Image (cartoon, helix red, strand yellow):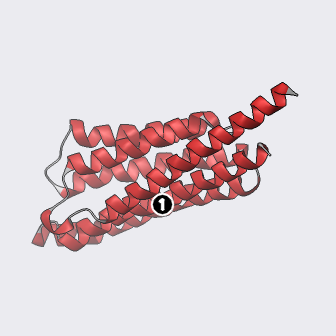
């Protein structure tokens, strides 16, 4: 009986910590959406957001009862992408897009695999998060050719840079919602 009570407390604690992580990542998405596009977005700002989101996601992933290693790997990939922005600050817009496309593609693969190890609504939200990251990568990749012409002629326009910030925000918000669903399911296991 004591083991069951301890297990239930552990599930509640994990659920609470995962919920806090989900809310934190959603708040980061707001920060990404509000990046000052008209003044330019620095590599350090993007890197900081990605590192923060990655670390939060990795910690939340370590609390999961299913797909733990994949959830932690998705967080690690996000943090590594952020480190790339800080270690190698790039002065042009397009070199910044390539690591984000890579990050989104790798994350979508990891989350796609993780969705097979999850069940119920967590599986659906994991697949949605993987799909969102894949879609954002494809949108960035296809928009690259048109944007190349715009940037070549006019330089990185505030609208183009702002859309880049919205890509981060969209990925973060879906990931935050995934963590909230994981927290909900973990809390349900504790009852």
Any part of residue 73 in sight = no
To which quarter of the image does residue 85 belong? top left
Q: Is residue 45 left or right of residue 132?
A: left
Q: Residue at x 35, y 66 (%)?
A: 166
Q: Residue at x 11, y 72 (%)?
A: 154
Residue 82 image point, x, y percent: 32, 42
Residue 133 image point, x, y percent: 49, 57
Q: Quadrant of the N terminus?
A: top right
Any part of residue 172 in sight = yes
Q: How many marks?
A: 1
Assess disc 1: are there few (<14), some (14-19) or many (≥20) residues with their C-alpha within 10 Å of its C-alpha.
Answer: many
- Does 121 appear above or below 11? below
Determine which residue is flagged by label 1. 173
Residue 111 image point, x, y percent: 58, 48
Q: Residue at x 27, y 72 (%)?
A: 146
Q: Residue at x 46, y 41 (%)?
A: 56
Helix, strand or loop status at disc 1: helix
To which quarter of the image does residue 177 belong? bottom right
Residue 76 image point, x, y percent: 45, 36
């Amino acid at each position: 009986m004591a083991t069951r009570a301890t297990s239930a407390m552990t599930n509640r604690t994990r659920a609470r910590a995962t919920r806090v992580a989900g809310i934190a990542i959603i708040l980061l998405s707001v920060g990404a959406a509000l990046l000052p596009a008209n003044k330019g977005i620095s590599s350090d700002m993007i890197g900081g957001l990605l590192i923060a989101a990655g670390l939060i996601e990795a910690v939340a992933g370590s609390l999961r009862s299913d797909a733990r290693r994949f959830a932690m790997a998705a967080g690690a990939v996000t943090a590594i992408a952020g480190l790339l922005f800080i270690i190698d600050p790039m002065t042009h817009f397009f070199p910044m897009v390539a690591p984000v496309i890579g990050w989104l593609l790798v994350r979508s693969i990891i989350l796609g695999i993780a969705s097979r190890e999850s069940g119920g609504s967590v599986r659906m939200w994991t697949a949605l998060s993987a799909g969102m990251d894949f879609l954002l990568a494809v949108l960035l990749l296809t928009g690259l050719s048109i944007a190349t012409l715009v940037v070549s002629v006019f330089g990185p326009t505030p609208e183009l840079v702002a859309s880049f910030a919205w890509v981060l925000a969209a990925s973060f918000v879906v990931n935050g919602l995934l963590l909230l669903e994981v927290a909900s399911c973990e809390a349900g296991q504790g009852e």
